[in-house]
């Protein structure tokens, strides 16, 4: 009798240990009540203009200024370029101009759409989200749009030292101030998924950096208000220093958040605005200085008349979407978007990219 009780006790203890191991495990657990595997699969993008599709045109109704919503979600956005099984739902929460607080759980009041991570938490209970892609940070302390405006002003004034002179010291400091804000937003995304019963390994969290929309290869006849009004030295700084430093900062944050990282800092080289056909812009993946003249005549829309300037165009979003799609189906923790011999972008694992750079 005692032996029988002893065996029963051992079995009970073993069952309890096994149950505890399952509960604290970081594996996908379809049996958990808040993590139902039978829900339809979905991929979600969060962030700012690069993922919303700004510059791609064909914006979703309700995101092109209606009720002051300027998210500019485009049919050309990278998420719509991904090669996904037909049963996978594509959900784009990214919003042009978004800062990290809008991705976080407690954004400043007044925005047309509110917190993206809160919307993610709701979607995570309606879908089995397999991938969450995030691109954020450039609109915070770096103020990339303000930098562009500052550099245009330097061109107008023909300032000998250009905008880069002051940015060489200020830019790294701005990137450092940005990093904890991006980390906070990523933590809020993790918390949103946790609240729906997901474990960190049951979905892929991907952080993307940014591509340079301009570079020193601008056609001379377009280096003015007809296309790209920047001094050559400033174009060189933006592409070779500013964008790579921003990318390095985001990579460090992705590491802290245990997220995968896709480096776009070299993705646009040779295809920047004003580097292609002067008349048709063929070969360019980024918009030139763009003015919506009709919006200038509307007091409510005038402030956004140049919103598309220096963002990826439809061709650029297609290339960035191809690279993202290739990265998503791998298990590589880090990769770079680099062109092949035909000029098309592909996701190259970090170690392979390093070997290419130093054969």
Image (cartoon, rainbow, N blue to C red):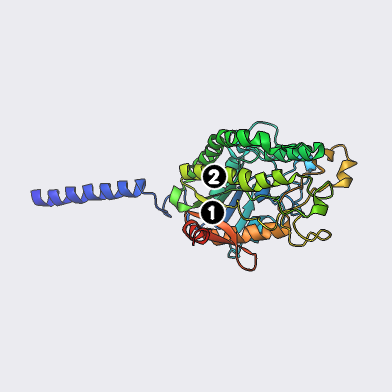
SS assignment at label 2? helix
Q: Which residue lies furthest to the top in this view?
A: 109
Residue closer to the observer: 242 or 358: 358
Viewed as shown, does residue 336 lie left or right of 23? Answer: right
**What's the residue at 65%, 48% (across, down)?**
239
The residues bearing labels 2 and 1 have C-alpha atoms spaced at a distance of: 22 Å
Tell me if I can see residue 1 in this picture: no
Q: Residue furthest left?
A: 2
Q: Where is residue 134 in the image (x, y as percent from the top left)?
A: 58, 47
SS assignment at label 1? strand
Viewed as shown, does residue 43 lie left or right of 64? Answer: left
**What's the residue at 12%, 52% (across, down)?**
4
Q: Where is residue 190 in the image (x, y as percent from the top left)?
A: 50, 43
**What's the residue at 61%, 44% (across, down)?**
241
Q: Earlier in the sequence, mark 2 or mark 1?
A: 1
Q: Position of residue 102 (x, y in %)?
A: 63, 38
Label 2 neighbourhood size at 10 Å, few (<14), some (14-19), many (20+)? some
* Residue topped by disc 2: 248
Residue closer to the observer: 225 or 252: 225
Residue closer to the observer: 354 or 26: 354
Tell me if I can see residue 24 in this picture: yes
Q: Do the residues labelled 2 and 1 touch (CB within 8 Å)?
A: no
* Residue topped by disc 1: 131
């Amino acid at each position: 009798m005692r032996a029988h009780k002893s065996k029963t006790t051992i079995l009970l203890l073993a069952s309890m240990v096994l149950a505890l191991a399952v509960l604290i495990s970081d594996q996908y657990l379809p049996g958990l009540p808040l993590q139902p595997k039978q829900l339809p699969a979905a991929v979600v993008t969060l962030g700012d203009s690069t993922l919303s599709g700004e510059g791609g045109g064909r914006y979703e109704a309700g995101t092109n200024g209606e009720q002051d919503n300027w998210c500019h979600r485009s049919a050309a956005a990278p998420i719509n370029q991904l090669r996904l099984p037909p049963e996978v739902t594509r959900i784009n929460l990214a919003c042009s101009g978004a800062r990290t607080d809008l991705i976080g759980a407690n954004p400043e009041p007044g925005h047309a759409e509110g917190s993206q991570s809160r919307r993610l938490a709701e979607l995570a209970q309606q879908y089995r989200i397999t991938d969450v892609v995030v691109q954020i940070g450039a609109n915070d302390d770096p103020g990339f749009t303000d930098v562009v405006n500052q550099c245009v002003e330097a061109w107008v004034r023909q300032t000998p030292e250009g905008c880069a002179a002051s940015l060489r010291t200020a830019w790294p400091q701005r990137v450092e101030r940005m990093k904890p804000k991006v980390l906070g937003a990523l933590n809020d995304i993790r918390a949103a998924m946790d609240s729906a019963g997901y474990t960190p390994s049951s979905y892929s969290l991907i952080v993307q950096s940014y591509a340079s929309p301009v570079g020193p290869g601008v056609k001379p006849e377009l280096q003015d208000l007809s296309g790209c009004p920047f001094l050559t030295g400033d174009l060189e700084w933006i592409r070779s220093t500013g964008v790579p430093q921003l990318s390095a900062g985001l990579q460090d944050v992705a590491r802290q958040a245990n997220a995968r990282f896709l480096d776009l800092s070299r993705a646009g080289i040779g295809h920047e605005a004003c580097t292609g056909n002067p008349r048709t812009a063929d070969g360019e993946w980024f918009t030139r200085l763009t003015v919506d003249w009709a919006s200038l005549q509307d007091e409510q829309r005038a402030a956004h008349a140049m919103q598309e300037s220096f963002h990826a165009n439809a061709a650029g979003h297609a290339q960035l979407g191809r690279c993202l799609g290739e990265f998503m189906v791998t298990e590589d923790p880090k990769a770079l978007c680099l062109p092949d011999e035909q000029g098309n972008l592909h996701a190259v694992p970090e170690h392979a990219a390093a070997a290419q750079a130093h054969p």
